[in-house]
Image: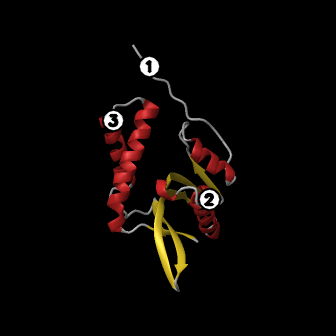
């Protein structure tokens, strides 16, 4: 069973380390920045979205937990992260980050996490989930299409060289 729960403050530093590393690589690859500049931009995005750490009303940073029962006791393990932000006026949410730890992939946790998010959102009247997928992230693109997402646009860029 997969459960989405709010991240707690002791988990936030590990998330920040993961996010800055992962997102800075994406920034460098997609926009041609140096790694130093990409790290700076990733840090700025995180600070802009979470200026007071987890104390924010606009963004929800969740842990994806796998719960199992073994020998009559319930065990849980964090298998990934999901960061999204609800716009009530649009009845939508935008997923900023969705990550299943590499050693936890191929267990169906991604699909189960999206289904859990859909259930939570439906219960509060949210009707649409939006997100952006990096062009080269074919694994994520396949997951999202498998759970019913459709491509609704393209992000494009051009580097101007002199």
Figure quadrant of residue 6: bottom left
The quadrant in which the C terminus is found is top left
The furthest residue to the top: 162
* Way the structure is coloured: secondary structure
In the picture of the structure, the residue carrying the numbered disc 1 is: 160
In the rendered image, the vertical position of residue 36 relative to residue 52, given as above or below: above
Q: Nearer the viewer, mark 1 or mark 2?
A: 2
Distance between mark 2 and mark 3 Cα atoms: 32 Å
Q: Give the residue drawn at x 37%, y 44%.
A: 42
Residue 81 appearing in the image: yes
Do the residues under discs 3 and 1 have CB atoms within 8 angstroms? no
- Label 1: few (<14), some (14–19) or many (≥20) C-alpha neighbours in 10 Å: few
Q: Is residue 90 left or right of residue 12?
A: right
Callout 2: few (<14), some (14-19), or many (20+) C-alpha neighbours within 10 Å?
A: some
Q: Quadrant of residue 125?
A: bottom right
Q: Nearer the viewer, mark 3 or mark 1?
A: 3
Please tell me in which quadrant of the rendered image residue 124 appears: bottom right
Q: Residue 44 in the image: state x and y as whole percent.
A: 34, 45
Q: Does 84 sit above or below residue 45?
A: below
Q: Position of residue 80 (x, y in %)?
A: 48, 60
Mark 1–mark 2 Cα distance, whole angstroms, equals: 39 Å
According to the picture, the residue beneath numbered tag 3 turns out to be 35
Q: Quadrant of the N terminus?
A: bottom right
SS at mark 3 in the image: helix
Q: Is residue 68 above or below residue 112?
A: below
Task: State the mark number for residue 111.
Answer: 2
- In-front residue for pair 29/42: 29
Residue 71 placement, left or right of 152: left
Count the marks.
3
Residue that appears at 66% across and 41% down? 152
């Amino acid at each position: 069973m997969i459960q989405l729960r709010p991240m707690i403050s002791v988990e936030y530093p590990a998330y920040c380390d993961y996010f800055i590393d992962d997102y800075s690589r994406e920034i460098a690859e997609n926009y041609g920045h140096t790694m130093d500049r990409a790290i700076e931009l990733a840090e700025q995005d995180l600070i802009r979205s979470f200026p007071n750490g987890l104390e924010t009303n606009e963004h929800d940073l969740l842990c994806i937990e796998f719960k199992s029962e073994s020998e009559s006791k319930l065990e849980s393990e964090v298998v990934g992260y999901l960061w999204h932000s609800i716009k009530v006026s649009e009845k939508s949410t935008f997923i900023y980050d969705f990550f299943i730890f590499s050693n936890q992939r191929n267990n169906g946790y991604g699909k189960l996490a999206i289904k859990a998010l859909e259930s939570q959102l439906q219960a509060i009247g949210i009707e649409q989930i939006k997100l952006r997928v990096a062009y080269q992230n074919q694994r994520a693109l396949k997951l999202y299409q498998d759970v019913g997402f459709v491509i609704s646009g393209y992000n494009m860029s051009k580097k101007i060289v002199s």
